[in-house]
Amino acid sequence: MPERIILVGFMCSGKSTVGRGLAERLGWEFIDFDEWIEREEGRRITEIFREEGEPYFRRLEARLTERLKERRRVVLAPGGGWIMQREPVAILRAGSRMVWLQVTATAALERAGADPTATRPLLSGDDPLEVARSLLEEREPFYQQADLCVDTVGRTPEEVVETVAAWLER
Ligand code: S3P
């Protein structure tokens, strides 16, 4: 068993739900980066983006990563853009198994609901689908460094948990 499992993937790929389920199944701790950051900052991710801008948020993610590097037996769910930061990813990579939860831009937006920008500030603009497509395209090469890739489209979070758990127990 690795020391940590890191779930990476685009917005709405199911990282939080699958992460919680997987952690429960393994008897490990679960840490959702966005939740942690919101708790520490005392404000929502959308507010952090609006009031401080994206670079500030990325620094918070990097700082949290640094604090987590000694943790063992933990399932981590960083936000979808964390993978683009070289140093934080490198800090956690050793001793971890990285799993990419794959989703298409269309499915991600369906899951995000009627007002995707309410919780995902990066999907703002006139055409959230186009924004999602282009972000996904830019990030895909980075998600590809994962050790396992699971297609989540048309599958329940429980099924995805099963797939990841079976792979870990191989
Ligand atoms: C982001 C994804 C969000 C959140 C922030 C930025 C991104 O997390 O961290 O809005 O850059 O893709 P989820 O992937 O959990 O939606």
Image (spheres, rainbow, N blue to C red):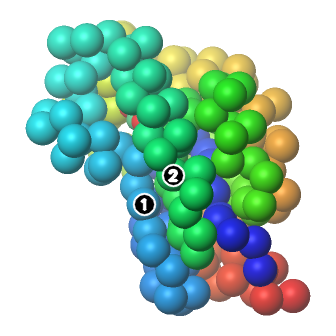
Task: Single out the mark in the foreground, 2 or 1.
Answer: 2
| Residue shown at the point (75%, 72%) measured from the top left | 2
Q: State the SS at label 2.
A: helix
Residue 18's x, y, as percent?
51, 69
Is the residue 55 above or below the residue 32 in the image?
A: above
Disc sitting over residue 50 in the figure = none
The residue that mark 1 highlights is 31
Dividing the picture into quarters, in which one does residue 34 lie?
Answer: top left
Q: Which numbered disc covers residue 68?
A: 2
Report whether 155 appears left or right of 117.
right
In this view, 109 is above or below 170:
above
Mark 2 touching mark 1, by CB under 8 A? yes
Q: Quarter for ligand 1?
A: top left
- Mark 1 burial class by Cα count in 10 Å: few <14, some 14-19, many 20+: some
Residue sitting nearer the eye, 128 or 58: 58
| Mark 1 close to ligand 1, CB under 8 Å | no
